[in-house]
Amino acid sequence: MTKHKYKSEGVRKRSAPFPWLRVRPEMALDGMPKFNLDTFNKAYFDRLRSQVIAARDRGIYVSIMLFEGHSIQFSLPPWRWDGHPFHKDNNVNGIHGDPNGDGYGLESHTLKIPAITALQEAYVRRVIDTVNDLDNVLYEISNEDHADSVDWQYHMIDFIHNYEKTKWKQHPVGMTTHRKLGNQVLFDSKADWISPSKFRRENDPYEVDPPVAHGDHVSILDSDHIPILRNDHARDQRSWVWKSFTRGHNVLFMDPYLEYMKDRNYPKDSKPDPFYNPIRRNMGYTMRYANRMNLAAMIPHNELSSTKYCLANPGSEYLIYAPSGGMVAVDLSSTFEMFHVEWFNPRTDKTIPQQKTAGGDIRSFTAPFRGDAVLYLYR
């Protein structure tokens, strides 16, 4: 199934393999055999494991999205709900995931149908059994699901946590949300990581001034949910990365070079669009600093910098973003240590060392170049 924004909307496409076997003689709506929801398809789980291993061997983490909530809300027929295994005409088990008959099947992502919940739990157990021994795994319950799915998602978060307690390894479980649902349900969840969304209004904080991450969840800011990509200014692409990083978030870029975007059409042989190089490069720059710093000890400290964008382990190191460059005041009054000082230009990838400075007071530093700047103080 496809999301509403893609050119192929409304065109029938088959995906294979599915988690469940298809058995004859009865035919599903797509002209293929119906699903037997009591019998898993080994090929599906073998492929899942092989792909996670291939990613591991390349140093890549995999977020396994267990369920898809966007398409059953927003895709058009025939493949919004008609292609789903829980459609009453697509399985031999009598499972009916759309009891109100509205053609969406949203009830299948609630706790209203115990038989479906049991099938979903069995599927999740099988996924966990398939990849539990691998370290490069995260779980996401569902992609941009609907408002009535919250209790179901909470249930699945608890289910994974409880089941993995019986296993050798435990993996982070994540929850994301659609913009219509709001972010508070993420903050209230028991998920290990969350991905807040931009609300549909101008000057949303997650786009222009990301709030400090709460700290009780790993926070991932996804460019698919926070459409900074529609901004035509390279400076603002850079700024969003650094503002998010120094406020304690992790930036995730949904690179559109092989996707269809509303205002940018890409040929089939397209390569990464250089328009988005500022966001790609600056994600790399933040990773470089993350690897240099004792990141586990770094906490957002707005109060220590005049710019209000500061990651710090007070008395040890400070990483500060200055969206407009110029002079930056840093509160070093809690320490008498000596600090190395360097400026980083996120536009040119140039680092400029400065004279050391002593703690014991509020110190001022002026960027040696124009435009946004990064200041790094370290012992």
Image (tube, rainbow, N blue to C red):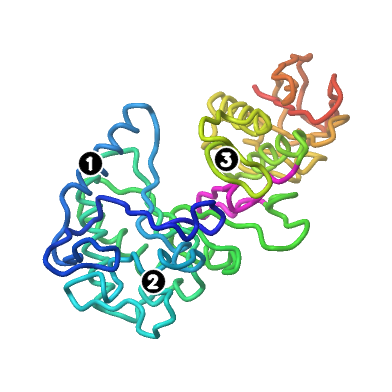
Residue that appears at 27% across and 50% down: 16
Residue 22 in percent (x, y) is at 17, 60
Residue 366 in percent (x, y) is at 86, 25
Residue that appears at 62% across and 31% down: 273
Disc 3 on helix, strand or loop? Answer: loop
The amino acid type of the residue labelled 1 equals: Asp
Residue that appears at 50% across and 54% down: 217
Q: Quadrant of residue 305?
A: top right
The amino acid type of the residue labelled 2 equals: His
Q: Write down the region rendered in magenta.
A: 212-231
The amino acid type of the residue labelled 3 equals: Pro
Position above or below: 34 against 268: below
Q: Is residue 82 left or right of residue 325?
A: left
Q: In the rendering, which numbered label is found on residue 109?
A: 2
Q: Nearer the viewer, mark 2 or mark 1?
A: 2
Residue 228 part of the magenta segment: yes
Position above or below: 222 against 83: above
Q: In the rendering, which numbered label is found on residue 133?
A: 1
Q: CA distance from mark 1 to mark 3?
A: 32 Å
Q: Residues within 10 Å of mark 3 (few under 14, many from 20)?
A: some
Q: Quadrant of residue 233?
A: top right
Q: Earlier in the sequence, mark 2 or mark 1?
A: 2
Q: Earlier in the sequence, mark 3 or mark 2?
A: 2
Q: Is residue 82 left or right of residue 277?
A: left
Q: In the rendering, which numbered label is found on residue 256?
A: 3
Q: Nearer the viewer, residue 367 or 311?
A: 367
Residue 328 in percent (x, y) is at 84, 32
Q: Nearer the viewer, residue 270 or 254?
A: 270
Q: Specify the quadrant that holds the C terminus.
A: top right
Please report contact status of discs 2 and 1: CB closer than 8 Å, yes or no.
Answer: no
Q: Nearer the viewer, residue 339 or 25?
A: 25
Q: Nearer the viewer, residue 75 or 295?
A: 75
